Structure formats: C-alpha cells, structure tokens
Image (cartoon, coloured by chain):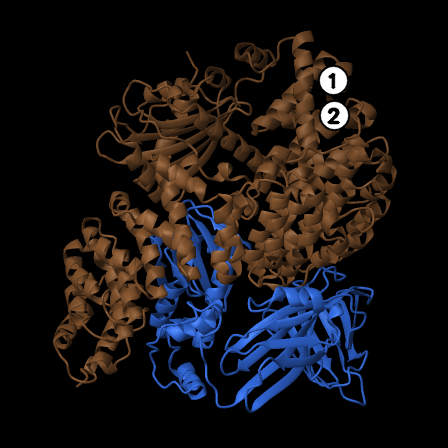
Amino acid sequence: MAPPAASQRYPSPSQPSGKSEVSDLKTQLRQLAGSRAPGVDDSKRDLYKKVISYMTIGIDVSSVFGEMVMCSATSDIVLKKMCYLYVGNYAKGNPDLSLLTINFLQRDCKDEDPMIRGLALRSLCSLRVPNLVEYLVGPLGSGLKDNNSYVRTIAVTGVLKLYHISPSTCIDADFPPTLKSLMLHDSDAQVVANCLSALQEIWSLEASHSEEACREKESLLSKPVIYYFLNRIKDFNEWAQCLILELAVKYVPSDSNDIFDIMNLLEDRLQHANGAVVLATVKVFLQLTLSMTDVHQQVYERIKSPLLTLVSSGSPEQSYAILSHLHLLVVRAPFIFAADYKHFYCQYNEPSYVKKLKLEMLTAVANESNTYEIVTELCEYAANVDIAIARESIRAVGKIALQQYDVNAIVDRLLQFLEMEKDYVTAETLVLVKDLLRKYPQWSHDCISVVGSISSKNIQEPKGKAALIWMLGEYAQDMSDAPYILENLIENWEEEHSAEVRLHLLTAAMKCFFKRAPETQKALGIALAAGVADFHQDVHDRALFYYRVLQYDVHVAERVVSPPKQAVSVFADTQSSEIKDRIFDEFNSLSVIYQKPSYMFTDKEHRGPFEFSDELGNISITPEASSDIVPAQQYEANDKDLLLGIDEKDDNKGLSSNNGSAYSAPSLENSSNITSQMQELAISGPATSATTPQSSFGFDDLLGLGLSTAPAPTPTPPLLKLNPRAALDPGAFQQKWRQLPLSLTQECSVNPQGIAALTVPQSLIRHMQSHSIHCIASGGQSPNFKFFFFAQKESEPSNYLAECIINTSSAKAQIKVKADEQSTSQAFTTVFETALSKFGMP
Amino acid sequence: MLQCIFLLSDSGEVMLEKQLTGHRVDRSICAWFWDQSLSQGDSFKSLPVIASPTHYLFQIVRDGITFLACSQVEMPPLMAIEFLCRVADVLSDYLGGVNEDLIKDNFIIVYELLDEMIDNGFPLTTEPSILREMIAPPNLVSKMLSVVTGNASNVSDTLPSGAGSCVPWRPTDPKYSSNEVYVDLVEEMDAIVNRDGELVKCEIYGEVQMNSQLTGFPDLTLSFANPSILEDMRFHPCVRFRPWESHQVLSFVPPDGEFKLMSYRVKKLKNTPVYVKPQITSDSGTCRVSVLVGIRSDPGKAIESITLSFQLPHCVSSADLSSNHGTVTILSNKTCTWTIGRIPKDKTPCLSGTLALETGLERLHVFPTFKLGFKIMGIALSGLRIEKLDLQTLPPRLYKGFRAQTRAGEFDVRL
C-alpha cells in the first residue's frame, strides 16, 4: 500500500520547493504514523529521505516535527537514524516538541540491541536543549555501566556534551570521577580514549575555579598515567593515538632514562601510515630532547626519513602540511635535509602551493655541496609555463646567491635570465641583480655590462624598473649612456604611474648629477620640477627636499644623497629568532602553517576551546558612545601589548609584501638614509624638518610654491547632517561591521598639525566627536593608530561605520567605510575627511 | 576539534552539512569560502588551510567535491587534513567514487558514516572494514558484497565486535569456504629528465596491496628476497614492528578484504624503460617540434599504454602536429596528448610538426614539460621480489596469488 509519492524521486535541490511540498509530506507522514501494514517501513524511509534532503538543502521542514516523532516508533535502524538526525537538527528550535522525543529516545536507550541503545543515547545528548538536561543523567549513568563497549564509548562522549550544556549538572552527578575510573580500568581502548579526551576538556575548563579539578588535571600528566597510556598505545586507533601523543608532549620526564624509555616505546609510531600520528610522535621526540643537545641532533636524523616519506606519498594537501613543518625544522637544523634536496624538486603536476613550499625548502637546504645542482634545477623552473612559479624560482636563486660565498656561477646564471627576454623574468632578475650588487659590489663590472644593454622600454613592472633606475644612478660612472637613459625616462614622467619608480628616478638623477654633472643637469632640472608638481605626497616631498638641499649646498647634498656605500653583509631577517622558537614550541599546530606563533592570530581567550572569534578580534571594544571619553587604561596592560604587537607586525608585513619582501631594501635604505641625513641638516641648516609645521609652510611660501598640494583647509559645508547624539552599542557595531559590505576605501593624508596633535588616540576621538562622528574603539600607539568610528544620519537611523588607520610617520590615513545606505557612503566619507583635515587646526 | 563538516559541489552548493558540536557553524561560512575562492583564483582555492574571519577552514578537493571542515580552536592541521582524506576515501569506497550525483543520491549513508567516524569533533574510527560492518554499503556495492560475503540483508544489525577485540582492524570471526590471499606489488616510477637528457631523479614508489579472505584469526609472514633496497617504509597498523626491525620480515594478522599492507620507496634508480627525446627549434615566429619515444632498456615484459602529454605554451597561437604512430589530440585548453600504445618493432614513434607563435614573437621562451605515461604488467621495476608468504596455521583449501605491475607516476621530461 505504498502511497503514490513514494515512487517519485525526491526533487533535485536545484528546484527549491515551497510550502506545499512540506505540507504534502506532513499529511503523508500522518497517514503512515499509526499503520502497521507490511512494507510501511519502506514508504516511511522514502518520506524520511525526502524530509532530510529538504533539510540538507536548507528548506525549513521543522513543521513536520510532530509527525516525524510519531512515525519513529519502529524497529528499523536506518529509519531511526534518519529520525535522530532530523530531531538533532531541530530540537533546539522546538524545545516543547523535543519533550516528545525524549520519551521515545529514553525508551530506546533501554533497547536490547546495543546499536540502538548507543544511537539513542548519542541523539539524546545531541539535543542540547538546556531545560531538558535532567533527562540525560539517568540514561548516561546506565550507559556508562553498559556491558557493551559501543554504548559506553558513546556515553563517555555524552558526558562531555552534557558538560557543555550544563556544567553544574555534570559535576553534581559525579560523572568526572566515574570517567576517571573507566579510563583506568575499562577493557575497551576507545572507551579509554574518549574518557581521556572528555576529562582533559572538563578539567581544564573547571581548573579556573576548582582546585580539585586543577589537581586532577595535573594528575593526568603524572608518570603512572602517562606510562599506562604509552604502554598500550598500539591498542588504540590512530586518532586516539594522536590524543595520547599530545598528552605525552606535556609530560615532564624525570630523568634521561625516562626520556629514552618513552622514545623506545614510541619509536615504531614513526612508521605509522597515518601522517597525523607520525607528526605527533615527532613532536614528542623533539620536545623531550630539547635539553639534550646531542640526542636532539640524533632525533633529527631519526625523524628525517619518515617525514620525507610523508611528503612524497600522501595527497598534495598532506604534503602541504608536512612541508610547512619541514621548513620549520630545516631553519633550525639546515644540515638535516641537505643530502635529500632532490625530494624537494618540483613535479610538473603538483599544485602551486606545494611547489612554492618546495622552492622555499630548496632555498633553505642549499649549502656548499649542493648549490650547483639546486641552482641548475631552479633555473629550469624559470622557463616554466607557470609564471608565478617561474618568478618564485628566480627569487629563490637570488636568495641562495645572497646566502652563499661562492656566487660566481650564480651570477652567470642570473645574467643568463636577462637574455631570455621575458618581461617578468627580466624584472625579477633586475631586482635580484640589484640586491647582489649591494652585497657584493665586486661583481658590479660583470653585471653592469649586461644590465647596461637592457632597454628600459622593455620593462613594465615597477619593481624591475625601479631596480634598473637604482643601478643607473649608483653606477652612472660605469655606464656610458646612463644620463641619457635617465633623461629619456624623465621626459616620460607623466606616463610613469608608479610612485616608487618616480621616487627612484629622482634619487638616480641626483646621484648621476654628482658624478656627471654637465650631462645630467638638464634632466635633473626637469625631474625636480616634475617632482615638485607631482600629486603624490612622497614624490613631492622628496623633490622639494632635494631642491632645498641643492640650494643650500651641493656638497652637503652629495653627502646626503650619495654617500660612499658599504656593502650590506646581512639582509634583515623578517622574523626574530624568538618568534621562531615560539613557533617551534607549537609544532604540529596551525602556527606552523601560518608561520606565526598562535598569540599573533588568536586572542588570549580564543586559545581555549569553544570561544567565538570575530573580525574585530585585534582591537578591544570600549564603549565610548557617551560624551566622556574612556581612557585607554581600561585595556588590560597585557592585552595592550599583545594588541600593539599584532598591529605593528601586520602593518610591517603589509608593507614588506607590497615591496616584494626582502628585495625592497634600496628604497628603505634610501629613506632611512635621508631621514638620518635630514636630522643632520636640521641641526646645521635652516629648519626644514617636517615636525615643525609652521616653518615648513613659511618655506613653501618663500619658494612661491603655494599650498597647492597641502590638504585644503577651507571648510566645506558638510553635505550630510549627522546626529550629534547618535548611539550604538559595541555588540551591534560588531555585528554590523561583519554583515555590511565594504562600500568605500579611501586613503588620504593627514596634515602635519594633525599628526603633531595625535600623540594619544583620545585627541582625535574628541575632535571627531565635535563633528558628530563617534568612536567605538581605538588602539595603537605611535606611529600606528587604529580607530573604529560610527555616525548616524540626523533625520533617520541610518548608520555609517568606519575603520580608520593612521600612520603618523607617513602622515597617511586609510579609511574603510561601511554604510546602511550604500548610496550616501561617498557623502559620509567627504564629511569624515573634512573633519579629519581640520584635526589639529586651532 | 572540528566543529562542522560541509560537502560542497563544484558549483559551490552545500550538499551536506554535519554539525559536530554544540556550537553551530552557520552555513554562511560556505558562501564566504566560495566567494573567496572565486575572487582569489586558483591559488587560494587550493590552499588546504585558510583563516576566515570567524573560523579556520581545512579543505581538500576530490573529483570536484570540496570537503570543508571548520574549527575555531587550535588543532594539529595534519590531523584535520588526514581525517578529511579518510572521509573522502571511505565515501568513494562506499559509493564507488565521489561526485555530486552519488553524494546526493546516498546522502543518508554519508550522514550515517560521518556519525560513526567522528563524534563531538573528535575522530572515532575510520577503518573501512569496521565501518562496513556497522553501515551497509548502498545497493550496487552491497549486492556485490552480499554475494561475496553471503550476507543478504541490506542493513547490518550486528555490532562490530572489532572495537572490542584486541585487533581493532579485524572482525572477530569471518568464515570462508575457500581461503584466498592475494599479494599485489603496485609500483609507480617517478622521474625527472632535465633539458640535457640527464636523469635528475628516478625513484619508485610502491605499495604492497593485499586481499585476504581467510577464516578465523590467521597469522601471516611475508618475506622479500631483497628487502635491503627498500626505504621510507610505512606500514598498516597490523604489521608488527620488531620482526621487521630484526629480520626484515612482515609479520601480521591481516584485516579482512582489501587493504594496503605497506608502502615503500626505492631510490636512485639508474634507468628508465622508455626514453623521450624532445626537440624544439624556433625561428621567425614558427617552431619545429620533433619528439622521439623508444625503449631504452627492455624490462622483459611488454610496455603498454604509452602516452605523452604536454601543455602548449600560452604564446602558441596554433599547432600542427602529427605522428607516424598512434594518435595526437589537442584540446581547447592547449593540452596535447599523444597516445602511442605499444612501441612497434619496425619503427621509432615520432611526433613532429610546427607551432605558430603569436604575432610579434620571434622565439619560444617558455618550454613545455612532457609527461610520460606507461604501464608494464607482471614486473616490479624496482627489482623487489617476494620470497614467500607463510601462514602459521594452514587453513584447508588455501590459495595464494602474487602479481606485480609498474606504471609511470610523475614522469616529467623537461625541455
């Protein structure tokens, strides 16, 4: 008596179904509910399947809850499973209805089939309805005593689930001691493993307010318990082994015999087929031997081959995770993989994220004995079809050259790249040649002859162009036509879109002028004129500065711009060794993948289990909607340090990656040179320092340049009326900030008076408030400040949210605006910028 | 501690959602993920670990299906990735592959499997033989299986006793009327030949695959004639470590059915069975291509299914390639495949023709990498030989079978 609907296939998810289908299902389920006819289970199965397929594609089928529960009185396991799945999904939303379910789940918990007992118990604990916890205690208690291990396994996890719904119920029912005795005495390995995992979590959450829990947590790390687990580790399944190994990492061995005992017990885990087990074992080995230097070195030897096996035998995703860890190891012990460099040769079909890590490995393992082979291999990638990888491999060659003493062969290879006449290859290579020259000036002769023959017209990329221009300026005396090439470039000033290139042009023209004045004078004049008129603040400033220095004294100018250079011996490392050690301590965690210690990407409170993170994570929210300003002391001192650390790091990161990581050094060097020389000048010469705004304006007038490039201080009437009494609580702000799309990003410069006034965030907050823009959170200290602002329209409750990052050293503000009404976000930004431009004005 | 697993189709549609803990992960994370992967292009899409504003995402992609797992707490990334790989393996084992239709047709099974594989965010059992006892595979497979095992019911209602026995990978007491055990050596040759025709790297990755249908609790010993050539071994959990350490003998109680006993690597091989000699010369906008393929050292068995494929560089506007043996196809994505099959006795297969470059280009600067494929049945090119397979107690009517085959893995010939 199958109903007609049962023979139809359920509709494909591409045709979303409406209410009529759901009510249809409802009637059909109701018909079947009481029926005991043969074959009724099959019809039910089809209907259940439909309901769940709707649920899966996101259609709300909670209205058939009652019917589903009624139909679930059956002995068919698959039917039961489907019903449990459905109930688990909707119980939270229908606490009243789930009382119905409790009844039949409790009955099933006493079924004679252990599978049904287990499944019912699992579903019961997964309902997660807080006011029904009292019904869980009984079934859980008997589940823990069940004679079938499957049920016990589920009951143990159920206790943990109960704890998360209601910690007090769980503690009051005395479950943790029961789990402890199960953990130490149960014959089934899975039960034991689940006990361990549950107890670890319960006790570490309880430890904050219970001394007993704290003691119990410590006792898990005692010698007998650790050995109890390690001795029978082979009985556990692979995932439970990972759990035990993680526990073992925290164990502090009493003496060296202890250490060797543990390593002997675990040695064969290194050969396990599951990579997670192998890596967890490696971590135990490394941590145990940290204090024993020579054993530690032997451990590197021992773990080498299992790790290399994992790299080449797993899926690309697994290789990725392993390679990240290898990179960490190779930085600490470069010798370990030196002989195995061929493992890191890229295969054509590998995804580029694996290739990229392999290139990093090749760079890291290169030493005197294998450099030749590695560089040969890397050079083959340079002609690769995959352009991103070709670029990376050229950079890798450069990095190796900067590491090694014998660069002879590598320089030749690099110069060969230039002959390939591929624009991206040429650009990357020029950047490298420039870095090489800074470290090994003795190679200038060979390089210059090749570089001199490159036509600047063929290089489009700013990085490469900037590098070429730098070399033209630096080695103007060796390149006969350097002034003319520069002149050519300067004549096309208008077409040069990259500010970086224009900055380099200015500097190169100056350097060239000091060496070959007659030939360059005209070009320098054009360049300075174009630079002063440039709309880009930095270019404008630099041109003006050069102009004034030249006016003051040409010899001082030469000392400032083109002092005799010393070869750079070591390029700054991007990461401090302290950070690297931190990451090493967090071996086998996400920190390794991100190459950052966890405190940099997770807040303190997010490091524990089950905490929610949010987008504003880096900055703590202080309610500042009211007129009195809450000072920054509200932040916990600790948190503040942490927070600033992150902000600065991120900014630096952003900067250096923009500039192409380590190869951007000349521009940095130039600017630092200039600033240092500028101080000298400020002492000896007239006051030109930017920190005293009045004098700088005076100077501008003196030169007759006007204030054309300074932000217009004339007040423009705001187009948008903002509500001066707007209010928004931090929670709502966070939510909005997450939900709203970014409607506008703007960069603008902050006037010098403003920068001078911005010694603490509060000054800007007060200022913006007078313009009806309220601050909700702020942070940072010189030179980076970060603010979150909000404002409301005067007439209607339409919100504007803004994030504003101000860097006082570059006098730049970056503004991100999100708005309820997208259309008016431009108007708001104008108001915002106007308000910001008045900051610091008397 | 994983909080949620999503399965996404190749168009980004959420096919399946499995919440694992009390903290529900909103589906919108998938939309975020998909937007990101579309906007960031391929490099982002394939990155296995991603930090979203609210969660850490782990993903693996199998046959167009994205397995996405979310977590908010620190956990070993490899564990999450390994687990997802196991989920994908088990699903494809159960459903006979993974694709959108298969998963949508069998989503109940997928839910059931996930239910047993992970509880409260922590992996439980991923051993296929145990899962198969708890959850019956879907129709086609289960029909086959019921013929094999003699178990006719679609739903298994017995509990796996394996979880309770001291050998977690083996059901307690399987019974077979005829006892059979097969050992396959399956090897893949990975090689890189550089521009000068030198063999930069040549090694074999091999697996010992077994299919055991043995009654009771058999204890097996497998020994090799030349175990010293093996490196980088990884073993199935059933293999006892000590006998291997002391005598290089594999001693184990096998799981029931098919499984991978061990994997190994044999390095520093000196020779490949097939050679590829590519040549490209370019002159004023056109390139002449000629590629020769032939047998370098005869392995003693027929080399079959030889193919050579490569990606034409982007700057090639049109290609005119033909061969004196086999067929050449060029797809619209500029992938060129030359299917050779077996190498004839009387001539050397040769691919030749011209490539026209885009206007303005004189010479070719970017060179393709040739990928070689081949298959040789009946031989393990590493030279590994199985000496004997012993059973501690001999069951009646025992049949032992051994096979070997080698195919090309990642075999790159660069130009």
Q: In terms of depth relative to the viewer, which is nearer, A504 or A591?
A: A591
Q: Which mark is residue B98?
A: none
The image position of residue B360, as x and y in percent, is 71, 59
Q: Amino acid at mark 1?
A: Ala
Q: Nearer the viewer, residue A737 or B51?
A: B51
**Image vertical order of residue A781 relative to residue A343, above or below:** above
Q: Is residue B158 shown above or below A153?
A: below
Whole-angstrom CA distance, mark 1 to mark 2, is 9 Å
Chain B shade = blue
Residue hosting label 2: A510
Name which quarter of the figure residue A523 lies in. top right
The amino acid type found where label 2 is placed reads Met
Question: Quick one: SS at disc 2?
Answer: helix
User: For residue A796, what is the image quadrant?
Assistant: top left
Q: Position of residue B239 (x, y in %)?
A: 59, 68
Q: Is residue B88 left or right of residue B187?
A: left
What residue did someone put label 1 on?
A557
The residue located at (22%, 66%) in the rendering is: A110
Q: Which chain is brown?
A: A
Residue B150: which quarter of the image? bottom left
Contact between labelled residues 2 and 1, with CB atoms less than 8 Å apart: yes
The chain holding disc 1 is: A
Identified at 53% across, 47% down, the residue is: A248
Q: Is residue B250 left or right of residue B44?
A: right
